[in-house]
Amino acid sequence: MIEKNLIEVQKKIMESGLLRDSKEITLIAVSKTQSIERIEKAYKLGIRDFGENRVQELLQKIEKLPKDIRWHMIGHLQTNKVRQIIGKVDLIHSIDSLHLADAIETEGKKKGIYIKGLLEFNIAKEESKYGFQIEEMEKVLEHMTHFQYLSIEGLMTVAPFVKDAEENRKVFKKLHQLSVDIKSKNVDNISMRYLSMGMTGDYEVAIQEGATHIRVGTGIFGAR
Ligand SMILES: *Cc1c(COP(=O)(O)O)cnc(C)c1O
């Protein structure tokens, strides 16, 4: 099942990214709640990027799975848990507060480890979702430009749950535009090379709108 699903997802990535180099699109298999065995299956099929949203679960899986996996932290991260994941994850997608960014910078400094992160924006202004508001952008950039250990590599959003993926096109367009606006400011320590957007229901639209990282769970592993 996982194999069939993966072939399907990879085909769709190729088709939606026709005007782009598909090597620049990273498929992150979202493995939250999935067993080690199922993750190993995806690994054997060539997947090396996995996404998790809970620190405890992430740490247990890192222990048991091959060392060449790139782990992506994609869920809300409490500042008191930062310490546990620094140096173990490749990219933190969910930097959603200045407080959290400070905690990552401080921990990086303490351990002498450089960390890559994305700023999460709540583009659709959903009450239930984490993330900065677009209006806060200037303040956020100003705050992070002097960091030495945490470098901001791009933006991330979790789009609303919708029936028709087309409804989220405007959300993806807005995140993309925001990254263009930020890039044009040429802020130290902040590059906009990554755009993490699109999940099982809408990754094709996200790719069309410029996603570099898509986060697909159900579409690979089946319903959770
Ligand atoms: C669970 C999750 C996903 C994957 O969702 P699917 O709909 O199963 O593809 C993507 N991003 C985040 C932040 C998630 O928590």
Image (cartoon, grey):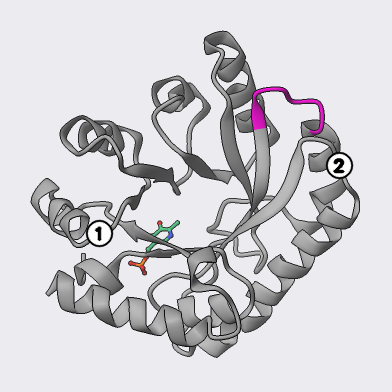
User: Count of labels shown?
Assistant: 2
Tell me, yes or no, whether the highlighted magenta stretch contains residue 213: no
- Give me the residue at 16% from left, 72% from top: 3
**Residue 129: image location, x then y, percent:** 55, 57
Decide which of 168, 7 is in the foreground and name it. 7
**Residue 180: image location, x then y, percent:** 80, 63
Q: Residue furthest top?
A: 110
Residue to which mark 2 is pinned? 187
Highlighted range, magenta: 145-150
Res 18 → quadrant: bottom right
- Give me the residue at 66% from left, 25% from top: 102
Residue type beneath disc 1: Gly
Q: Earlier in the sequence, mark 1 or mark 2?
A: 1
Please determine whether, in this image, residue 146 is positioned above or below residue 177.
above
Q: Which residue lies furthest to the right in this view?
A: 185
Instruction: Give me the disc on residue 206.
Output: none
Residue to which mark 1 is pinned? 46
